[in-house]
Image (tube, rainbow, N blue to C red):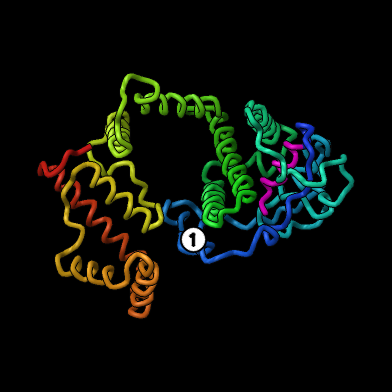
Amino acid sequence: MRRSRAVAGLISRRASRPSTALPPRSSRGSPGPTSSIRASLPSSARVTRMLGLPPRARSSVTCRPSSVSPSAHGSACGLLSSSPCSRRRTTCRRLSRRARSSPSPPSSPAGPDSRPMTAHPTGEPLLELVRLMDQLRSPGGCPWDARQTHRSLVEYLIEESYEAVEAIELDDRSALREELGDVLLQVVFHSRIAQEAVSEPFSIDDVAAGIVAKLIARHPHVFGDATGESADHLESRWQAMKSVEKGRTSVTEGIPEAMPALLLAAKLLRRAEHGGVEAEVATAPVRAAADQAFDSVGEAGLGQLLLALVDRARTGGIDADAALRQALREHRVAVVAAESAGLGDHV
């Protein structure tokens, strides 16, 4: 697992909470059919290419003993031996097996995953995470953490998000709590990097304040006078408020093209529908064939139908993902044209 587990372990010890090593992933339950969700998503390397980011070079850095006090950082950073890193994540690795098996303060036999949920969260562990990241990025901290940039962390942000999705699909509560922690680490990490920027710096406080203000502004039915609205109406108004805030002139704006193709298709179609934009999704023959195929297999067979189409494209020498993305680009143009012609409510 990732080095971020080591960071999480250090936070637990600094907070004087019982701590034991997390069980290996294999003990959380065997992967089921839904574990294929990550296989259906583009790899981090592919997303890196989509975003036009430079490939990550393999590092030749070796792990060496840290000059930082082990109690402060050495254990979490994993700088526990002079042997080369077994993985390409360079200097700062997750806790080694030796570190996890070394004597530690007495802890609950049940382990951290069995702790009951905090009845009234205080936010103190969040502040501890922020303080810890400050230490890792400061002089005398972790060399690996100190040299990371927004771009170098992109693949980790994507990977952690996929693993959180997988935990949700597997209904694995223990894994979900852990993976959400990994995602949270990415938020704090990027915020700390942004805080050091010469141009337009911002901190984790700015990030949190921004989302608080946004949620309050977009929930007038909770924090304002609006009442008695349906969920569908609230979602439409949410999108309208986002468009006004961001100065959007089309429902297609603000949709990341680097999203997985199927998710991108669903989002683009949903945006057009909420905006009342009437744009042809496919030609009449193609739409008729799709309707007939769906009616013949139903909801239960939709996944197999999609898989069969991908396989048919593959045997025909066609990249199904690329074909769908091209169709989405054409549909995006059609939606914008329909908006310009007044065939919708716009944004």
- Classify residue 249 by image quadrant: top left
Residue 253: x and y, percent? 29, 42
**Residue displayed at 83% across by 41% down:** 107
Quarter holding the N terminus?
Answer: bottom right
Q: Main secondary structure of the magenta part?
A: helix
Question: Residue pushed farthest left?
Answer: 341
How far across and how far down the image is residue 318, in percent?
33, 73
Q: Secondary structure at mark 1?
A: helix
In front of the other: 216 or 283? 216
Residue 264 appears at what percent x and percent y?
35, 53
Task: Judge left or right: residue 44 versus residue 247.
Answer: right
Residue 235 quadrant: top left
Q: Amino acid at mark 1?
A: Ile
Question: Can residue 301 be found in the magenta stretch?
Answer: no
Quadrant of residue 328 within the rendered picture: bottom left
Q: Which residue of the protein is positioned furthest toward the bottom in this rendering?
A: 315
Question: Residue placed farthest to the top in the image?
Answer: 225
Q: Which residue is mark 1?
A: 37
Q: Nearer the viewer, residue 109 or 123?
A: 109
Percent x, y of residue 41: 46, 60
Which quadrant is the C terminus positioned in? Answer: top left
Identity of the residue drawn at 28% across and 61% down: 326
The answer to whether residue 155 shows anywhere in this view is: no
Q: Considering depth in this image, is 163 or 200 the residue closer to the camera?
A: 163
Nearer the observer, 294 or 311: 294
Q: Is residue 240 left or right of residue 95?
A: left
Q: Which residues are magenta?
A: 1-12
